[in-house]
Image (tube, rainbow, N blue to C red):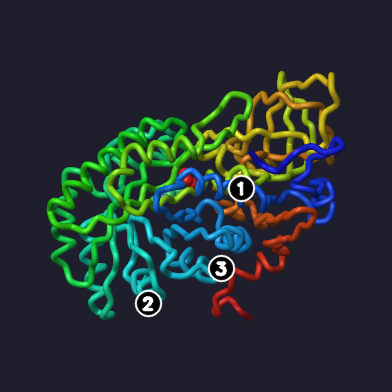
Amino acid sequence: MDHFIYNNGVLHAEDVSVKEIAAKVGTPFYLYSTATLQRHYTVFDEALDGLEHKIFYAMKANDNMAVLRVLAGMGAGMDVVSGGEYAKARAAGVAGDMIVFSGVGKTEAEMWQVLNGGIRQFNVESEPELRLLSKVASAQGKVAPITLRVNPDVDAKTHAKIATGRSENKFGIPMAKAREAYAEAASLPGLEVVGIDVHIGSQLTDLAPYRLAFSKVAELAEALRADGHDIRRLDLGGGLGIPYQRSNEAPPLPVEYGQVIRETVGHLGCEIEIEPGRLIAGNAGLLVSSVIYLKQGEGRNFLIIDAAMNDLIRPAMYEAHHDIIAVEEPEIGVEPAPVDIVGPICESGDTFSKSRLMPPLKSGDLVAFRSAGAYGAVMASEYNARPLIPEVLVQGDQFAVVRPRPTYEEMISRDTIPHWMES
Ligand SMILES: *Cc1c(COP(=O)(O)O)cnc(C)c1O
């Protein structure tokens, strides 16, 4: 559920008209709803009711500082995957002991930074990482709390580019090598084993892979305890999918996901950690764009809009579907017709949708991409020298620009000219 609804024939974000925001901010822009972010956090929190648990928002989904502040205000911790994300989380007011550090390629500099600033745990993904972290922590006179991310070799049945739990993927330590790796971790100075970590992929629309992966983790937890390790936390990752196509998708609900967690690992008495990203931010955001031209091709019509693949890359990168709706509610009885919805970039890949049924639209009309709050703005670029588009946050009847559109001067001035070219 979200808070983007038609009201008097115009799409609203909570109590604000999207048309009104577009008139003030200019298109294209991202638009986020505070109430929706809060609701999604609460739904996860309630799904784990009765289990000792903590939620670490995977901030790579949407790391706008205002979004982080909303979630931190709800009590969320953060799952970070870089020194930059760690710095942003801290700047948003998140305490070090509410941050977990994930990722296959943590550098020595990032380890220094995070140990120095304070961290709840490192989710370590390889033996070489263990050794480097041991060295860095020892040199700092610190003890790094760690889990090892295991790769359970399960098929998450999601898009190949976002599946992470197969043995062919670069993530985690194979289950068969896990006990050996934990033994090494326990023998190294500067490390303290606190649990196990797993994350099998993103946009999962079936609970069976979770059930399989978590059962394997439960088995491993018992084996590791028998080996003498203090397994007290289980980080179960994120990945629960959202309905991108509302007319025919109904992915499992967080409450059902919570039930799988209870049934597979509930008996272990571990503190449960989860790292949802997409499900918290995805449906809390729209991408709002306007129609530039309606162009009639040979046998097809193109709706050319002012948003492009540099603003939202998911369709080009993952063949992703986004529902796209008119900001002015179509009148009842108006016949939709198929159009190809495309951006202005000089690549055929800059196509958001082919043969999409849309109501009649003309130049200047506004459209909104649903489910654009996650992996949208964070993956944007300035390809074709198109400045990064603004982000707007709504709360009730208020809205604010939470990232302004850079001017051309600002965009240009980030490049510098070498001294030998200065005259
Ligand atoms: C990307 C990622 C997540 C979040 O995945 P979502 O599908 O956005 O919920 C959580 N944990 C790790 C380690 C990740 O890489």
Q: Is mark 1 within 8 Å of ligand 1?
A: no
Q: Upstream in the sequence, badge 3 or badge 1?
A: 1
Q: Is mark 2 within 8 Å of ligand 1?
A: no
| Badge 3 element | loop
Residue flagged by tag 1: what amino acid is it? Arg
Q: Upstream in the sequence, badge 2 or badge 1?
A: 1
Residue flagged by tag 2: what amino acid is it? Asn
Verify CB contact (< 8 Å) between mark 2 and mark 1: no
Q: Residues within 10 Å of mark 1 (few under 14, many from 20)?
A: some
Tell me if 254 is positioned left or right of 199 in this view. right
Residue flagged by tag 3: what amino acid is it? Ala
Which x, y percent locates residue 194?
27, 60
Q: Is mark 3 within 8 Å of ligand 1?
A: no
For the residues carrying marks 3 and 1, which lies nearer the camera in this image? 1
Which x, y percent locates residue 333?
84, 19
| Badge 2 element | helix
Which residue occupies 84% across, 41% down?
364
Q: Upstream in the sequence, badge 2 or badge 3?
A: 3
* Mark 3 lies on residue: 92
Q: CA distance from mark 3 to mark 1?
A: 20 Å
Tell me if 410 is positioned left or right of 398 in this view. left
Q: Does residue 167 appear anywhere in the picture?
A: no
* Mark 1 lies on residue: 39
* Mark 2 lies on residue: 116
Which residue occupies 61% across, 55% down?
382
